[in-house]
């Protein structure tokens, strides 16, 4: 398992993409720190990067990586190693590379110019979303044989979760505004990892406005550590289920 | 010479106050009954168990080493009607709990030139209750109530139909309203701290010509609500951490010809909520980290918002209609994205503080859950370029490029 992981990691690091992504992250972080005057604004600007760009890159990169390494994977499957280990080594390598890019890319500017709690939480959200979308991309990859199709599915996951889903929720709220929809909207938000990351940040940045939300349920949810705990645990669910499903399919897949 | 001394002595002797010293166990009621006008009753340290002590002549009740007067949950502790009656350095605890007769630690009726200074109240229903009185000094008192719900407690400092008074340096916690004024005129409230009251920190109605200076109102159930009043001055106060669906830094209802200057609004769900208010000037206030800095209802007119800082608020302004009869000018908005080509520190393009999404949230509060999503950002951008739904006239034509130094 570790040997497999080592080779996968070497493979990724040899490609230029990992380095380019890290440099891109550094550039983004540096420019945001240069432009914004205080840390609160830094976390606001970073929020959009983490919610939009990071999942996109994770989805595309994970899919291409899967298909680029397909021959290596097939070779490995012919060896006496467990299928589970082959799969996990591939996805772990991708996850490690994506997280390292975020950590290095934002970590260096943070060491230079300082950080606060909300920026650290934001980094954690970025890493969590990378894992979620890498998992979804692997799921898309094992579902089909065609690379272009798999990239298409990954991209549609991304578009769906970052744009279409919110539009749908907004439409729902708007057209059913006569009904008490508070609990429904909150649970709908939990069905989308991007929204979930956003809500965790909202609880840090806009708690005053969220407290304007009527109803004891929300007072309770947003006003205590309970909200943070619940959203974090659902995020964990989002991290685990795509990977688990993809692995199950991979185990039975006929290459 | 000798006769002069005698005359002087005769003249001064009635004025020379006697001092009556009491120790725990002595009856305050008896002492009051025996006391002459101008006497000082000194209570030495310890606990006195008494209630409904009626004072109708000019005497001073003074504590030495903070004596405690325990009302044993019955009625009022002191009932006062007269002139020049003073209370100093006492602790009064456990009044009755009744909304029918408004039990209070010290209750004044029809009094003048009275004062309450350095008095500590604990577990009282109403704290200090004044009606139909004038020239009062209420200074450096500490009022605590330990009720769990709003209906279980009265107001901390309660003035009804009073005038020409001074409320200074008091600390009020856990009551229904911290400071409550009704039909009170020409009164100054300053350096008070009002923290964690169940309903309003400050609540006044029909109380014209009053000033509120350098007070702090923090974590009150519904913030501060003031109504039906003209000519109010609010200066250098701090309104903070009033959070909840109906919590306001200040709620202004039918306030006219007033000034709100140099205040700090921090971490409130709504900084200022205004309804039916006119001709009021808002200048040099700092709105920081509020949910809504300003909710300006369409029923307000001729108000001016000038040279304020709006920093890190979720929404800067929201309103409920398309009519805007108020002026916004030369404020600093941290969300402003314009440029300043001629370097006069005033932005060259106007700023519209109402975003499309704040209009949506005003109609459907639960939509706030979508704030900062990509979808909503897109909608807001589109509305900025082609305004269709947001009010045309809610506009700051000369927004500042840099924040004012208001600390």
Image (spheres, coloured by chain):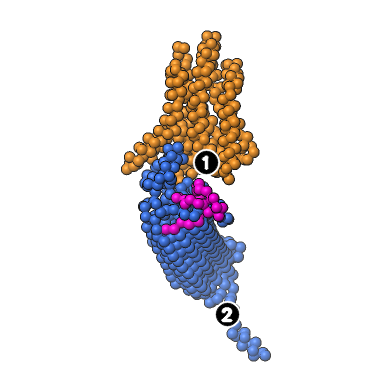
Q: Residue furthest front?
A: B342
- Viewer-proximal residue among B226 and A73: A73
> From what the image shows, is residue A51 above or below residue A5?
below
Residue range in magenta is B326-353
Say what secondary structure mark 2 lies in.
loop
Rendered location of residue A187, percent (x, y): 40, 35
Q: Nearer the viewer, mark 1 or mark 2?
A: 1
Q: Which mark is residue B15?
A: 2
- Mark 1 residue crowding within 10 angstroms, few (<14) / some (14–19) / many (20+): some
- Mark 2 residue crowding within 10 angstroms, few (<14) / some (14–19) / many (20+): few
Q: Residue at x 64, y 89 (%)?
A: B4
**Which one of the lettered chains is coloured orange?**
A
Q: Is residue A238 visible?
A: yes
Q: Tell me the chain of label 2.
A: B
Say what secondary structure mark 1 lies in.
helix
Q: In the rendered image, which quarter is residue B226 located in?
A: bottom left
> From what the image shows, is residue B386 above or below residue B16?
above
Q: Residue at x 48, y 40 (%)?
A: A202
Q: Which mark is residue B70?
A: none
- Viewer-proximal residue among A250 and B75: A250
Rendered location of residue A184, percent (x, y): 38, 37
Q: Which mark is residue A44?
A: 1
Q: Residue at x 48, y 59 (%)?
A: B282
Rendered location of residue A189, percent (x, y): 42, 35
Q: Is residue B101 visible?
A: no
Rendered location of residue A119, percent (x, y): 56, 38
Q: Residue at x 40, y 54 (%)?
A: B393
Q: Colour of chain B?
A: blue
């Amino acid at each position: 398992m570790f040997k497999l992981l080592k080779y996968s990691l070497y493979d990724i690091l040899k490609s230029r993409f990992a380095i380019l992504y890290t440099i891109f992250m550094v550039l983004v972080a540096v420019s945001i720190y240069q432009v914004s005057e205080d840390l609160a604004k830094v976390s606001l600007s970073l929020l959009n990067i983490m919610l939009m760009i990071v999942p996109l890159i994770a989805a595309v990169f994970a899919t291409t990586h899967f298909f680029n390494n397909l021959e290596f994977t097939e070779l490995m499957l012919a060896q006496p190693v467990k299928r589970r280990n082959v799969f996990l080594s591939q996805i772990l390598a991708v996850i490690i590379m994506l997280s390292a890019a975020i950590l290095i890319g934002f970590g260096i500017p943070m060491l230079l110019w300082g950080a606060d709690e909300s920026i650290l939480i934001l980094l954690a959200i970025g890493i969590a979303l990378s894992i979620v979308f890498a998992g979804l991309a692997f799921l898309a990859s094992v579902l089909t044989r065609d690379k272009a199709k798999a990239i298409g599915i990954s991209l549609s996951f991304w578009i769906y979760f970052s744009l279409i889903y919110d539009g749908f929720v907004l439409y729902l709220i708007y057209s059913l505004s006569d009904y008490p929809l508070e609990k429904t909207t909150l649970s709908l938000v939990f069905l989308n990892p991007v929204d979930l990351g956003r809500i965790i940040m909202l609880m840090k940045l806009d708690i005053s406005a969220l407290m304007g939300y009527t109803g004891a349920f929300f007072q309770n949810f947003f006003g205590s550590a309970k909200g943070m705990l619940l959203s974090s645990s659902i995020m964990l669910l989002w991290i685990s289920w795509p990977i688990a499903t993809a692995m199950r399919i991979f185990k039975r897949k006929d290459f | 010479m000798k006769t002069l001394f005698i005359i002087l002595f005769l003249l001064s002797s009635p004025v020379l106050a006697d001092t009556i010293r009491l120790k725990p166990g002595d009856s305050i009621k008896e002492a009051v009954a025996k006391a002459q006008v101008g006497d000082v009753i000194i209570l030495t340290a310890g606990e006195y168990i008494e209630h409904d002590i009626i004072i109708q002549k000019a005497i001073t009740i003074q504590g030495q080493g903070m004596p405690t007067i325990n009302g044993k949950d019955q009625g009022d502790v002191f009932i006062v009607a007269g002139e020049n009656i003073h209370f100093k350095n006492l602790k009064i605890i456990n009044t009755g709990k009744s909304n029918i007769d408004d039990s209070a630690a010290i209750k004044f009726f029809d009094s003048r030139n009275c004062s309450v200074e350095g008095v500590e109240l604990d577990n009282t229903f109403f704290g200090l209750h004044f009606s139909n009185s004038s020239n009062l000094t209420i200074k450096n008192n500490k009022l605590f109530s330990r009720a769990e719900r709003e209906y279980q407690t009265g107001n901390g400092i309660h003035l009804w139909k009073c005038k020409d008074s001074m409320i200074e340096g008091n600390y009020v916690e856990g009551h229904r309203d911290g400071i409550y004024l009704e039909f009170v005129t020409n009164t100054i409230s300053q350096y008070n701290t009002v923290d964690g009251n169940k309903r309003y920190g400050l609540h006044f109605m029909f109380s014209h010509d009053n000033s509120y200076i350098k007070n702090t109102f923090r974590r009150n159930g519904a913030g501060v609500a003031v109504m039906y009043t003209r000519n109010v001055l609010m200066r250098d106060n701090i309104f903070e951490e009033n959070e909840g669906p109906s919590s306001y830094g200040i709620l202004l209802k039918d306030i006219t010809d007033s000034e709100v200057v140099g205040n700090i609004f921090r971490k409130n769900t709504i900084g200022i909520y205004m309804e039916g208010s006119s001709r009021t000037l808002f200048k040099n206030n700092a709105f920081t980290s509020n949910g809504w800095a300003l909710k300006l209802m369409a029923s307000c007119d001729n108000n001016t918002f000038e040279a304020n800082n709006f920093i890190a608020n979720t929404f800067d302004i929201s309103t409920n209609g398309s009519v805007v009869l108020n002026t916004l000018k030369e404020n600093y908005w941290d969300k402003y994205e314009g440029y300043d080509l001629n370097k006069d520190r005033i932005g060259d393009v106007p700023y519209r503080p109402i975003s499309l999404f704040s209009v949506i949230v005003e109609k459907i509060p639960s939509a706030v859950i979508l704030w900062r999503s990509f979808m909503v950002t897109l909608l807001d951008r589109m509305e900025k370029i082609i305004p269709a739904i947001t009010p045309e006239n809610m506009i700051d034509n000369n927004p500042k490029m840099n924040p004012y130094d208001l600390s």
